[in-house]
Amino acid sequence: MRWTVLTASKSSGIGEGLTYEGDADVSPGSYVRIPLRRRMVDGILLARAQQQEKEAFAILKIESVLGNRPLLTEPQMKTLEWMASYYRCSLRQALQAWLPSPPWTTLLPQKTLHVTLLKPEEPVRGTRQRDVLDLLSSKGSMPLAVLQEETGVSRAVINGLTKRGIIEMTEIAESAQEIPPPVVSPPALTPAQVLVHAEMRGDRRPTLLFGVTGSGKTEVYAALIADCVREGKQAILLVPEILLTEHCIHRFQRLLGEEHVAVWHSRLTGARRRATWRRIHNGEVSLVIGSRSALFTPLQNLGLVILDEEHEWTYKNEQTPRYHARETAETLCRHAGAKLVLGSATPSLETWARAKEGRYHLVRLPERYLSQPFPAVRIVDLAQAQCGSLYPLSPSLLAAIEERLQKKEQSILFLNHRGIASALLCLDCRRRVVSPDSRLPFTVHRIPGNELRLVDHTTGLTLPVPTACPACGSVRLHCIGAGTQKVETLLKQRFPEARLLRADSDTLQHPEQMRQLLASMRERRADILLGTQSVVKGLDLPQVTLAAVLLADIGLSLPHFRAGERIFQLLSQLTGRSGRSKPGEVIIQTYRPDAPEVLLAAGHNAEKFLDDELALRIHAGYPPAAKLIRLLLRGSNVQQRATVLASNLKQTAESQHLPLTISSAATIFGGGKLWHILIRGAQPEALLQQADVQDAVVDVDPIECV
Ligand code: ADP
Ligand code: ZN
């Protein structure tokens, strides 16, 4: 029997696998050792090889099959093949998403050292020995690695205790451990939640759970996970940012017991990652919670996949394989016969379109838990506000913060993550000053000598700041945008007594720092939390009664068809952060107080926004009404190569009668070094079959496209 085997080897030309001779009764996904260029290497069995007429080479034999079960299941292997073909990467590149880097022997069950307490009453000297015995007397026996991690004692301390016969060390094979099944304590749902839970169970299609912030989507997930586990199956819960998920992890540890839940994310160390992988592969885990890569963990009997906040952009992988977790989860669930649940208060347009077509099942939770009212929303027009030297803090915002300080309540202030780059805005026509080279807004920089200059980061053009607006001639030009540091300084000036916390990528580098920050807010050791949107969204802080976005415009005027969607999601998220236990208020500061995404978010009207936006996309021919493929180019002569490739593609499309829109440009944040070609239409993939795009990286269904 001939098999196609994938290796982790990066040699070119074998990304699609090699043919080997092997037994007929091995399963796809099995771990094999194969000869390759006079060495033995790790491989994974893909599928039966296609029959070939004549072989130029002698077919070598698979040397051995390792482990007592395949590394990947059949549904997982099928999804891997789908990824390679849909996202146009090699099978080997797709495999990188599924398995930690080789050698894969470390994925087979290992022998681990366990420590058992023999003489609990024996007197010991020293606090470190005492710590070991205290921990052991509560647990009886535990893995050495865990004991050392929790007590921080050295191996010498353990050896000392072993010598005296107080503890004993034994080697246990991981797979030999008995794992009692989880005891599930299902949640008590509200009547509205009971209803959507029952509806979801009765429908095999992927379900969109469209529930406002605070409606208790987490509790519905818990009920679904409880069902799945009681049926002897396993579940995956994907979350956009694992740092913000601590309370959610505790919630599910209470549901199933700590030992049945695994947490998976990209910051796991190599050893931790492998140990967790083995636990999951060995069937010890009933629920994996993690970021997008948790979708690829080796659960044997998958029954349920949930994407919480399914609209979040972090579900798209921005490196090869450039997969989207939602699409990939849909394929995996189809092959595994598992249920897919997408939860959001502001669904992506992709998901909304499918729900409207009936391809997805739609259920709604339109009310907050215990009918908690939505916060009142105030829109502040920054062009009218007299901020003076405290810009971007408007007088109404300052008054609202002051009021919270007096009442000993808390405030959260958001800045967009690109808040440091500023632009030059005309307060009359409300346009940004754009570069004549790239037609994109200029960035304003202060150069040595304190002079302001306009810089076009895509072409390198710089100009002095004009005295009048190039579009309407007004002299009311204003430099907008401020970083968290600047706002922090202003707040300290204005409220010297307030206890202020700043949360951005500079101040938060470890999960522990995030934990401390949240604890400070919960325990009311801080009054104001100032943070970038990516750090602060999704927080559940009961004492917060004021949430404000300082500049709701950054991103709005990027030439991006998703700009409106993104700002709507951000503002809706924000309204979910205030008043979680008592009535709250939201302030939106903006230069575009009449923009529909601002007004609809302020009115808590997600459904109208989605319907209007979908109509716009259909009218303009953008996703999800059309398909988009992006080709990325970098390196020498990038501008010329991109232009030539784009014009070749246009010619091919024309000669093949493919109705496609094709454009090429420098990317906004690529500093002129990264160019892209956007191909948009009904079937852009048909063009890639006809044309040579070897020079570029292919990004199917891109999220970033400016
Ligand atoms: P969402 O994820 O939809 O924004 P959450 O799941 O965070 O909402 O729920 C909001 C708050 O309401 C949480 O503090 C949660 O504990 C509470 N809650 C929701 N449903 C229930 C329920 N059935 N029983 C007890 N508390 C609930
Ligand atoms: Zn103007």
Image (cartoon, rainbow, N blue to C red):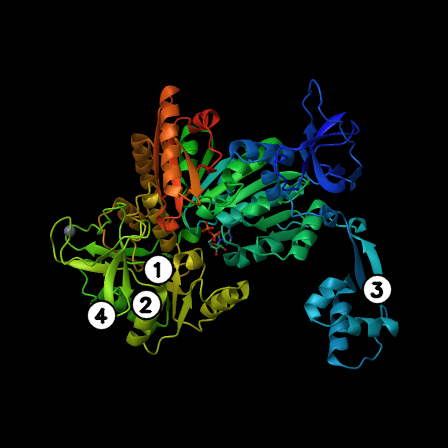
Q: Is residue 656 left or right of residue 389?
A: right
First in sequence: mark 4 or mark 1?
Answer: 4
In whole angstroms, how far apart are the C-alphas of marks 2 and 1? 9 Å
Q: Report whether residue 703 is seen.
A: yes
First in sequence: mark 2 or mark 3?
Answer: 3
What crowding class fits label 4: few (fewer than 14 Cα within 10 Å), some (14-19), or many (20 or more)? few
What crowding class fits label 1: few (fewer than 14 Cα within 10 Å), some (14-19), or many (20 or more)? many
In whole angstroms, how far apart are the C-alphas of marks 2 and 4? 11 Å
- Residue drawn at x 28%, y 61% is 445
Q: Report whether residue 120 is seen.
A: no
State the residue position of label 3. Answer: 169
Q: Choose between 287 and 11: the one closer to the eye.
A: 11
First in sequence: mark 2 or mark 4?
Answer: 4
State the residue position of label 1. Answer: 415
State the residue position of label 2. Answer: 487
In whole angstroms, how far apart are the C-alphas of marks 3 and 4? 68 Å
In whole angstroms, how far apart are the C-alphas of marks 4 and 1? 18 Å
What crowding class fits label 3: few (fewer than 14 Cα within 10 Å), some (14-19), or many (20 or more)? some
Q: Is residue 61 left or right of residue 533?
A: right
What crowding class fits label 2: few (fewer than 14 Cα within 10 Å), some (14-19), or many (20 or more)? many
Mark seen at residue 68: none
In whole angstroms, how far apart are the C-alphas of marks 2 and 3? 57 Å
First in sequence: mark 3 or mark 4?
Answer: 3
State the residue position of label 4. Answer: 389
